[in-house]
Image (tube, helix red, strand yellow):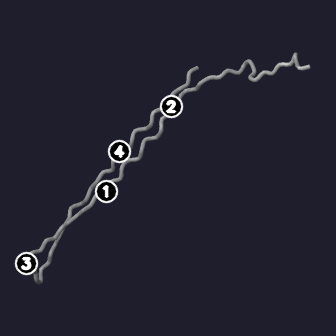
Amino acid sequence: MFEDQTVDLLPARTTLQAGAGGAGGAGGRGGDAVAASVAAIFVQGNVSDSTLTVESGPAEATGGDGGAGGAGGAGGDD
């Protein structure tokens, strides 16, 4: 009854092909910059009716560089 019937799972013109690898990932963000300006005052002995002046220099810091981007994905075999 079904002897002369066939089933095509994939049409003859269809071929499987592998594409190129994906793009690499984005680089990491730069590191945070933290700077602290610290001034210490030490007074020894009796101080009466005096003015103390303390001046601290500017605090400067530079954030770290961002990380390198990720490697691209591997391409498939044709």
Give, as a three-letter code, the residue at label 3: Gly
| Callout 2–callout 1 Cβ contact below 8 Å | no
> How far separated are the C-alphas under marks 2 and 3?
71 Å
* Residue position marked by numbered label 4 in the rendering: 65
Q: Position of residue 38 (x, y in %)?
A: 22, 64
* Residue position marked by numbered label 3 in the rendering: 45
Q: Position of residue 71 (x, y in %)?
A: 45, 33
> How far separated are the C-alphas under marks 4 and 1?
14 Å
Which one is earlier in the sequence, the residue at label 1 or at label 3?
1
Which one is earlier in the sequence, the residue at label 3 or at label 4?
3
The answer to whether 15 is drawn above or below residue 43 in the figure is: above
The answer to whether 45 is drawn above or below residue 30 in the figure is: below
Q: Nearer the viewer, mark 2 or mark 4?
A: 2
Kindly identify the residue that appears in the image at 13 percent across and 71 percent down.
Answer: 42
Q: Nearer the viewer, mark 3 or mark 4?
A: 3
> How far separated are the C-alphas under marks 1 and 3?
36 Å
Screen quadrant of the C terminus: top right
- In the displayed structure, does residue 57 sit left or right of residue 71? left
- In the displayed structure, does residue 30 sit left or right of residue 7? left
Kindly identify the residue that appears in the image at 25 percent across and 59 percent down.
Answer: 59
Give, as a three-letter code, the residue at label 4: Asp
Name of the residue lying farthest toward the right: 1
Mark 2, other Cα within 10 Å: few <14 / some 14–19 / many ≥20: few
| Callout 1–callout 3 Cβ contact below 8 Å | no
* Residue position marked by numbered label 2 in the rendering: 73
Q: Nearer the viewer, residue 6 or 30?
A: 6
* Residue position marked by numbered label 1 in the rendering: 34
Which one is earlier in the sequence, the residue at label 2 or at label 3?
3
Which one is earlier in the sequence, the residue at label 2 or at label 4?
4
- In the displayed structure, does residue 9 sit left or right of residue 68? right
